[in-house]
Amino acid sequence: MSLVLYAYPPSVYCQIVRMALHHLGLAAQIIEVDPFSGTGPNPHPFDLVPTLRDGGFELWETTAILRYLDAKFAEGVLSPSAPHAVARMVQVQSIVDTQAYWPLVRMVFAQRVVAPALGDTADEGCIADGLARAEPVLSALNDIAGEDLVLAPGTFTLADIHLAPMIGFFNAAPEGAAALGRYPALRRWFREIAKHPSYRDTCPPLTRVNS
C-alpha cells in the first residue's frame, strides 16, 4: 500500500480526503495525528491535517491533495472540462476554505455539538455569531447550486467532495439544519450527496444525526 494519510478522524478536512479516497476506490494506511494535542508523527509543517504520502511524494493542503488524487488516479474525471464549470468548482473549494469552515464548523458545530459531547457548556454567543456569518456563505453556495454547473444533479466533482463534509458538520447542529433549510437548492443538493456511499461511510460519529 503506497498511500498513507496522516489524519485526525474527527476532522472535517480529513473526511474530505477520505471521501475522495473512498469514491476513487483507493486504500490508504491511516496514521492518526491529533493537531490539538500535538500527538502523533505529524509531517505537516504547520501541525495541521491532513497530509498524504504516496511513496516518496508528500503533499499537504486539502485542495492540493484532491487535485492530485483526481489527476493521478482518475484522469481528471472529478474536474469538469467546461471553463464555467471548472471555475465554479474552484470557487466552491475556495469558499469552503476561506468563508465556510470557521463559522460552520468551528463556531456552530464545535459549540453546539462537540462542546456538550465533551461535557462542556456551549458558547451561545459564538453560535449566534457563527450563524450570522454563515448566512452569506449559504446564500452564495445556494446560488451556485441553483445554476446547474456544479453542485447539480447528474454531476459529481471535487466541489461536491470539498463541500459535503463541511455542510454535514454544520447540519449536525439543529440551528445549522434550520439555516440550511432556508436555502432550497443547497438543501436539495445536500440531501442527495448525503446518500452517496463515499459521504455516508466517512462521516465521523458526531455528524451523523441529520445527514
Image: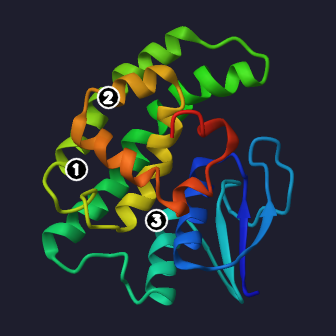
Residue that appears at 37% across and 40% down: 99
Circle 2: is it few (<14), some (14-19), or many (20+) Cα within 10 Å? some
> Is label 3 in a helix, a strand or a loop?
helix
Which of the marked residues, 1 or 2, is nearer the chain's N terminus? 1
Q: Nearer the viewer, residue 123 or 58?
A: 123
Circle 3 residue: 63
Of marks 1 and 2, the one in the foreground: 2
> Is label 2 in a helix, a strand or a loop?
loop
Q: Is residue 146 left or right of residue 183?
A: left
Q: Is residue 76 left or right of residue 182?
A: right
Which of the marked residues, 3 or 2, is nearer the chain's N terminus? 3
Of marks 3 and 1, the one in the foreground: 1
Residue 151 in which image quadrant: bottom left
What is the CA distance from the residue labelled 3 to the residue labelled 1?
A: 20 Å
Residue that appears at 35% across and 25% down: 179
Circle 3: is it few (<14), some (14-19), or many (20+) Cα within 10 Å? some
Circle 1 residue: 145
Which of the marked residues, 3 or 1, is nearer the chain's N terminus? 3
Amino acid beneath label 2: Gly
Of marks 3 and 2, the one in the foreground: 2
Give residue 211's mark: none
